[in-house]
Amino acid sequence: MLRLAVIMSEQAERLQERAMQFAIDVCALLKLLPRDEPGPTVRHQLAKCSTSTAMNYRSSRRARSHAEFTSRIGTVADEADESLGWLEFVDRAKLVATPELQRLLREANDLRNIFAASSGTARHRQRTEFQGNQRCSKSPNRQTLSRAELPSEASNRPQSPNRRITK
């Protein structure tokens, strides 16, 4: 089990480094975008989502619970997908002419697929864990009351000495 944890940790380290390098490489590409529109808009949006991919993945590794990890890794997948979308826009609009763009498109696609799969696995495990907890919390000796058998609200209310409750 410990060996598996070490392997997973090494894998997570490599993925964190890969996401960081992707953000750095995208930032280098941003310098090649035109100064007139849509260059500034693309520059701003692509800078935000590519760096968010790296920073949110870093943050997801420090999650305090599985639910927090699931939420954060979902954000990472969304940011990676947005990065891919903006890079596709740069390519289709022919805003830059460099072979680096094709490499970044492949890397963005790979990262999006990795993070989307991780997010799906985390959501599946969260649902499975939740269902497992529900099954464990119901003991066979616990009595379940129907709605008709439950005490009425009026009988549960504290009565004021000055107030009369009639049914």
Image (cartoon, grey):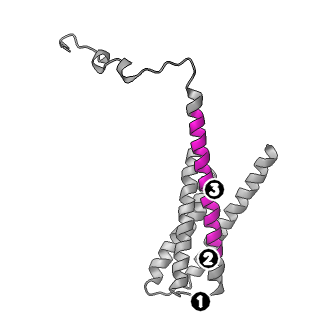
Tell me the residue that label 2 is attached to. 105
Q: Are marks 1 and 2 in contact (CB under 8 Å)?
A: no
Q: Amino acid at mark 1?
A: Ala
x, y (%) of residue 101?
A: 62, 82
Query: Of marks 2 and 3, which one's residue comes earlier in the chain?
Result: 2
Q: Nearer the viewer, mark 1 or mark 2?
A: 2
Q: Nearer the viewer, mark 3 or mark 1?
A: 3
Q: Is residue 139 magenta?
A: no
Tell me the residue that label 1 is attached to. 97
> Where does the C terminus fall, quadrant-wise?
top left
Tell me the residue that label 3 is attached to. 118
x, y (%) of residue 104?
A: 63, 76
Above or below 101: residue 5: above
Asked whether 80 or 42 is in front, the reply is 80
Taking the image as drawn, is residue 81 in sight? yes
Query: Of marks 3 and 1, which one's residue comes earlier in the chain?
Result: 1
Between the C-alphas of marks 3 and 1, the distance is: 33 Å
x, y (%) of residue 90?
A: 53, 82
Specify few, some or many for label 3: CA neighbours under 10 Å numbering under 14, 14-19, or 20 or more. some
